[in-house]
Image (tube, grey):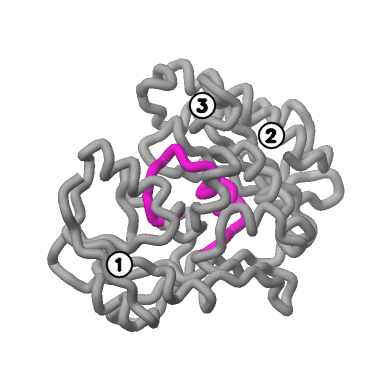
Amino acid sequence: MIGFELVQPSSLHEAIALLDTDDTSVRAFSGGTALMLMMKSGAFAPSRLVCLAGIEPAHAAIAATPDGGLHIGALATLASIEYSADVMRLAPVVARAMRRLANVRVRNVARIGGSLAHGDPHMDLPPVLAALGAEVAVEGPRGPRRIAVESLYAGYYETALTRGELITAVVLPPRRGWSSVYLKCTARSADDWPALGVAVSLKRDGGRVSESRIMISAATEKLTRLRAAEAALAGAPANERAFARAAEAAATEAQTVDDSRGSAAYKTALLRVYLRRALQQAHSGAER
């Protein structure tokens, strides 16, 4: 690796000022699990890394909100989220997803804000959080704003974050009456990046699907919401026939891509199978 400057601001305002530059090789640094790999491989050579360790105590808390939602500080480690009593109680699908997310060494170091800001479409958390209707709280030179997780990704390794902006928190709304499931298919080890990730949330009323949110990742260029599949479920009885229709709609809608984990056609076939399974589990309440 070539030499670079390492700075450690003592406040969020100072960190934003350091990142507000035309130099695209300046990066924020927290856990660094992905960034270090890119630097070691030569894929990225920073001129400056802005270490966020000095502001971690103020931005790492995990807490239930008064309305029954969750507020997760961007500098919370994935391990702390996995074992948080509030997360287990209010968003158990997030805690369960962690069990096959990389490995315990990575989860002990990686932060949720950096994981989301990295923009890799193979990450497990974006589809899960998007299916839950989560938003990221963002702070930048022009002030604070909120971005829905489903709108955070603009393309392959591209996000909607602008110059100098940092994710400060992940905010999950109350999910009373919803059942959520995340399934992933890996072509290698169980904790590897997925060939396909499917997250679904269902809300039912009298045996029918009143609302749904269906997200996929890894098989597509970026996190994608499958609205045609959701439309196929709207008002339908929560049964196998409706789930099969939704799976076919998803297979037609999703623009899957070829990569080292499988062909586009293979991933489309996976989507048909895994979406049906996820819907069945969400309907039965057997969250995964």
Q: Residue at x 42, y 75 (%)?
A: 54
Q: Amino acid at mark 2?
A: Ala
Viewer-closest of 167 and 160 = 167
Q: Quadrant of the C terminus?
A: top right
Sequence order check, earlier mark of 1 and 2:
1
Q: Position of residue 265 (x, y in %)?
A: 43, 17
Query: How far is the residue under mark 2 from the one under mark 3?
Result: 14 Å
Instruction: Tell me where the magenta segment starts and ends, as one range.
Output: 116-135
Determine whether, in the image, residue 231 is placed left or right of residue 262. Answer: right
- Element type where label 3 sits in the image: helix
User: Is residue 227 visible to us here?
Assistant: no
Q: Amino acid at mark 1?
A: Val
Q: Which mark is residue 251?
A: 3
Sequence order check, earlier mark of 2 and 3:
3
Determine whether, in the image, residue 35 is placed left or right of residue 273. Answer: left
Query: How far is the residue under mark 1 from the one under mark 3?
Result: 42 Å
